[in-house]
Image (cartoon, helix red, strand yellow):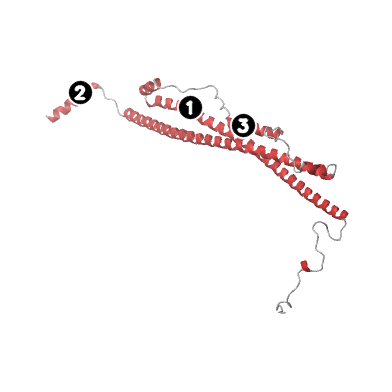
Amino acid sequence: MSRNPFDDDYRGSSASSTNPVKSYSTMANQSVEDEADYYEKEIEKYLQESLDSTERSRRHLDNSEKIGVATAQELLEQREKLERTEKNLDEIHRTTQMTQRNLNSLKSVFGGFFKNKFTKKPVEPTEVANVPQSKSASRLSETAANLSSGNSSASFSGPSGRTLNESSRNAIKGTRWEAMDNQIDENLDAMSSNLRNLQKLGLDLGKEVDSQNEMLERIHNKADRNDAIVRNQDKQMQAILGGTSTENQQTTLESMTPSVDTSTKVGFMMKAASLWK
């Protein structure tokens, strides 16, 4: 009979040895009670890890919600400052219109009179009307107020989702695991509510930022307009002051020249004519 040349090198595997195969359904060298206690500890460990994780996530989301509310309040305060700035720029523009009418009067008595006569007089309201609050600011203010008071309309109101099915909940009913599972479900519901609130708050914040960007553009344009008008009026004022100074100088020179009566002027003319002859 032929011999396998690899027989001497062959080593049997653990699967083919006489040692007993490890069971995956029972724990070796442990009783059923010990095995049950082991699985109970494992289940409790996983439940505790899930509980700790949801607690941390809930705290983070609560903190994010508070930061969002604080950001909303700062944006609303910034809007009030921008509204006051825009109102002041409008008031400056009305003032420059009145100033231009006065400059026209100073330039020429008749020209300024007729120009002002046929120019529409700027409206001078006794009290500057308040700028109406934008829709985005109203929504953001309402959302921030609801979140601050805990009465958010975006709170989760749907059916509460359960982490365990009905049979599993019945199996742990009356045990400490049931209390842990209930707390996990409560944390998940609160996290869902926080996420919905943050979503609504984020949308309202975005709309308010867009609205304030438009306001900043208007303020920039009005500031440039007022600056151009003021520069132009400054040049007009300098021209008026320069013309007045020249007229004063001419008046001073005339006053320094001695006056000559009419008969003397005629005598001078006759003498000049005799000399030419």
Q: Secondary structure at mark 3?
A: helix
Q: Nearer the viewer, mark 1 or mark 3?
A: 3
Residue 86: give x, y in percent of width and height: 53, 32
On the image, numbered disc 1 is attached to which residue? 94
Disc 1 packing (10 Å; few <14; some 14–19; many ≥20): some
Instruction: Return the residue found at the far top.
Output: 117
Are circles 1 and 3 on residues that touch, CB within 8 Å?
no
Q: Are marks 1 and 2 in contact (CB under 8 Å)?
A: no
* Residue found farthest to the left: 277
Residue 57 at x, y percent in the picture? 71, 45
Q: Badge 2, how many Cα within 10 Å: few under 14, some, many 20+?
A: few
Q: Quadrant of the C terminus?
A: top left
User: Which residue is the site of mark 3?
Assistant: 139
Q: Earlier in the sequence, mark 1 or mark 3?
A: 1
Residue 162 drawn at (x, y percent)? 75, 41
Q: Position of residue 218 (x, y in %)?
A: 50, 34
Residue at numbered disc 2 = 266
Q: Nearer the viewer, residue 7 or 69?
A: 7
Mark 3 burial class by Cα count in 10 Å: few <14, some 14-19, many 20+:
some
Of 11 and 113, nearer the camera is 11
Q: In front of the other: label 1 or label 2?
A: 1
Mark earlier in primary sequence (3, 2): 3
Q: Nearer the viewer, residue 186 or 267?
A: 186
| Secondary-structure class at tag 1 | helix
The picture quadrant where one finds residue 12 is: bottom right
Q: CA distance from mark 1 to mark 3?
A: 32 Å
> Which amino acid type is shown beneath numbered disc 2?
Val
Distance between the alpha carbons at the discs numbered 3 and 2 = 92 Å
